[in-house]
Amino acid sequence: MSAALIDGKAISEAVRKEWKERADNLKAKGVLPGLAVIIVGDNPASKLYVSNKIKACHEVGLHSEVHDLPEDVSEKMLLKLIEELNQAKKINGILVQLPLPKHIDESKVLEAIKQDKDVDGFHLYNVGALMTGNTVFPPCTPFGVMRMLSYCKVPIAGQNAVIVGRSNIVGKPMAIMLLQEDATVTICTSKTKELEKHTTNADILVVATGRPEMIKAEHVKPGAVVIDVGINRLESGKLVGDVDFEDVKKVASLITPVPGGVGPMTITMLVANTVMAAERDSGNVPTD
């Protein structure tokens, strides 16, 4: 048995076409969705992520702008910029690329973003609303995973879903979104005893730990769907996920690669959230 590949790049291209149609509908009514991205410092990975996000905006026909700030920018100046963007009519979504320098309070910055422009879904309002299924913006990575599962027609209701990792960005919101689709959800952490006992019970296994290739074939139930959210660069320069792809593909039924799996979907759902923000702002929310 060898797992079929979940091609995140191909799926994201198909999904982006849907959102381009919605963006084009808005533009026909004189509304151009706009995204502002703020990046602080010269982190190469952050620069690449921002570049990919701006490229996706251009592909869909959105207005986008990058505010590139020096590493030593003061928290006060960063908050002032966010407030200006909160008031800017041409900007529907604001994203602050993480991580931020240590002298800046990340929580304070994320809470400064107007909740209806919080296209990353990190504002406390949106995090709390996610619990009730009423969030304005689903967080992009879990949103992308759910869209990917839907696209691949993976059944969720009644399935055992196990998430390895409990971050606020992926693990916790992923659990909530799977619960909302009637999965039976287990969250594991780095302190989980006998991890294998939990993961081998998973029909859907989502891994987001930041530990390269920690999930092996023996952790996976034969026929499981494996979603690898991690991305790590080895000393050799090779990019790998949190799942040992070559080992696990021998037992899984479906598996995401790294790179080319969840990453493109995360960016696509950022575009989706920006278009949805513009629809709300302009009163052009689709009714169907």
Image (cartoon, rainbow, N blue to C red):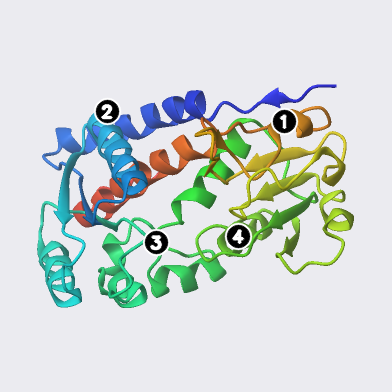
- What residue is pinned by disc 3? 136
In the displayed structure, 1 sits above or below 147; it is: above
Label 3, label 4: how far apart the Cα atoms are: 19 Å
Question: Badge 1: how crowded within 10 Å, few (<14), some, or many (20+)?
Answer: many
- What residue is pinned by disc 4? 171
**Which comes sooner in the sequence, label 2 or label 3?**
2
Q: Horizontal and vertical percent for residue 62?
A: 21, 37
- What residue is pinned by disc 1? 254
- Spot the residue most to the front: 235
Q: Is residue 255 left or right of residue 252?
A: left
Cβ–Cβ under 8 Å for marks 2 and 1 = no
**Which comes sooner in the sequence, label 2 or label 1?**
2
Q: Which mark is residue 59?
A: 2
Q: Horizontal and vertical percent for residue 257?
A: 60, 31
Q: Secondary structure at mark 1?
A: strand
Q: Horizontal and vertical percent for residue 229?
A: 58, 45
